[in-house]
Amino acid sequence: MAISVESLLKERKYPFIFTFMVLLICFTILTFTSTSTSTLDPIGFYPDVKPQPLAHFSSPSPKRQRLPLKGEPFLVDANIDWKPCKGPLAMDYIPCLDNFKAIKALKKRRHMEHRERHCPHSSPHCLVPLPKGYKVPLPWPKSRDMIWYDNVPHTKLVEYKKEQNWVVKSGDYLVFPGGGTQFKEGVNHYIKFIEKTLPAIQWGKNIRVVLDAGCGVASFGGYLLDKNVITMSFAPKDEHEAQIQFALERGIPATLSVIGTQKLAFADNGFDLIHCARCRVHWDADGGKPLFELNRILRPGGFFAWSATPVYRDDERDQKVWNAMVTVTKAMCWTVVAKTLDSSGIGLVIYQKPTSTSCYQERKERTPPLCETSDRKSISSWYTKLSSCLIPLPVDAEGNLQSWPMPWPERLTSIPPSLSIESDASEMFLKDSKHWSELVSDVYRDGLSMNWSSVRNIMDMNAGYAGFAAALIDLPVWVMNVVPIDMPDTLTTIFDRGLIGMYHDWCESLNTYPRTYDLVHASFLFKHLMQRCDIVVVAVEIDRIMRPDGYLLVQDSMEIINKLGPVLRSLHWSVTLYQNQFLVGRKSFWRPRP
């Protein structure tokens, strides 16, 4: 028989009613929260951000329910009086590479010192102007083959390389036919030529992460994308006007760098293959220091594919260079695994880095010596001179040589070999992967007001293990994973996963042209960063590298968001706040008047 509320009151059963109401309220709250988006905190690569438990969702279903987040416009403006950068190179201004006062004061330039970083003492607060007629870039994959001329209005390469089909001016466009100095029959033929020369090179399987030194307009890396190969293309900012800018406008991974007197901003034992086609690097200089640097960033068993005139010409100058290469590579224990001549007359030699220490031990003259083992957790290649030694082969916790990563795409989600030397790192890696998979799926891709179809070039300012990039792997995008210099060194792990990245100090300008990225992502970066530099300086740099209509996606505390949001608003960005932890800024076409 049903019990009425009146009878309960008469029987003074108030405790029962109170308990029943509390249980009912708790059940309602739990039911609501199980179907809404949970707060997902970072695994934590900053020491002052404590790891939080990952959100647990309700019972599995074929497709998890995704609810849109409620966004609120950020209306506060910092009221900063912005000025445009001035000078004939203002629209392509790169502060740390265009510091002409510092470059002019250099005592020597023999080793490309003038192409290295020389950051100004005070970071500029000016905004880079847009080229006249600038348009939203063409979408990928169309952009690989053609770009708007007005976006990169430079024609020096068109004239300088017109016989080699690097780039051609055609009406409103710059067209990239896939040619190059060594690509006489086209870049696709050249890529097949390398694989035919050495069948052990299986593009997109065991060879996933490639470095292209002196890349030109990066057609080699652009066409390797068809084979599931991600290539870090690099070249200096030199007389070959705008080659890296062309690459980035095309939607191909690239960065400005030079092998001069300092180490590259890449990880030890990272790349599966390094490529050089007439890249104009004197590899044997200073006793072979540039080659020692390649040895540092090439993983054991990795390949160096060198296509240059000393490989196939017999004149005195080329033979002198070839003999020097033979001497240095033998001293490094590199082995020639293939050498051939293509039907087009182009020669190729492929070296392989050793996978065993026996050669090092058997050398009669142990020159160059092996470097002392360094602490892998600290970053040692930022503003560091080139080494005169060879890094030891990496080993696991038991002292065994680390294995080659799993074939692609398994290597993206398998435990990276470089984590075998750290206790509990595997567990942390798996938690990080789960965290980013859930956050990207349930919040970033479906919950925020972002047009992902307009995104191609992405920068992750605080990449950690690159979980964010891994969670986007099914989209037609690429991610430059940045490991800040004052953070634990996770970059080798990122390369082990089959992804690319670099080191950087976000208190300085990045080695890239303006209008480079469609999306910049930062997860719990700014609080730690603000201990060393002004948040306005970082915002100016983000504005410089961001394409108009591009996005900034920040996950952070409200303390940080309340400092960053007004600065972005003063730049005429639209800024929206979601759930008091996600900020989405979108850059406009606004530029201050001269």
Image (spheres, rainbow, N blue to C red):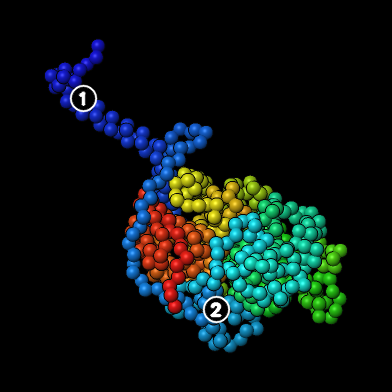
Mark 1 residue type: Phe
- Quadrant position of residue 553: bottom left
Q: Please name which of the two marks, 2 or 1, marks the residue nearer to the observer.
A: 2
The residue depicted at 44 percent of the width and 49 percent of the height is: 448
Q: Nearer the viewer, residue 65 or 406?
A: 65
Where is the N terminus found, in terms of image quarters? top left
Q: Name the residue under label 1.
A: 16
Q: Nearer the viewer, residue 436 or 458?
A: 458
Q: Position of residue 117 (x, y in %)?
A: 55, 76
Q: Position of residue 501 (x, y in %)?
A: 57, 61
Q: Where is residue 131 in the image (x, y as percent from the top left)?
A: 54, 72
Q: Mark 2 points at which residue?
A: 89
Q: Where is residue 51 in the image (x, y as percent from the top left)?
A: 41, 51
Q: Along the horizontal axis of the image, is 258 left or right of 343?
A: left
Q: In the rendered image of this protein, does residue 132 appear above or below residue 340?
A: below
Q: In the rendered image of this protein, does residue 34 appear above or below residue 412?
A: above
- Quadrant position of residue 158: bottom right
Which label's residue is closer to the chain start, 2 or 1?
1
Q: Along the horizontal axis of the image, is 147 left or right of 83?
A: right
The residue depicted at 48 percent of the width and 33 percent of the height is: 60
Q: How far apart are marks 2 and 1 (CA)?
A: 78 Å
The residue depicted at 63 percent of the width and 79 percent of the height is: 112
Question: Tag 1, which secondary structure?
Answer: helix
Q: Label 1: few (<14), some or many (≥20) within 10 Å?
A: few
Q: Which of 517 and 586 is in front in this view?
A: 586
Mark 2 residue type: Leu
Question: Tag 2, which secondary structure?
Answer: loop
- Quadrant position of residue 318: bottom right
Q: Can residue 96 be seen in this view?
A: no
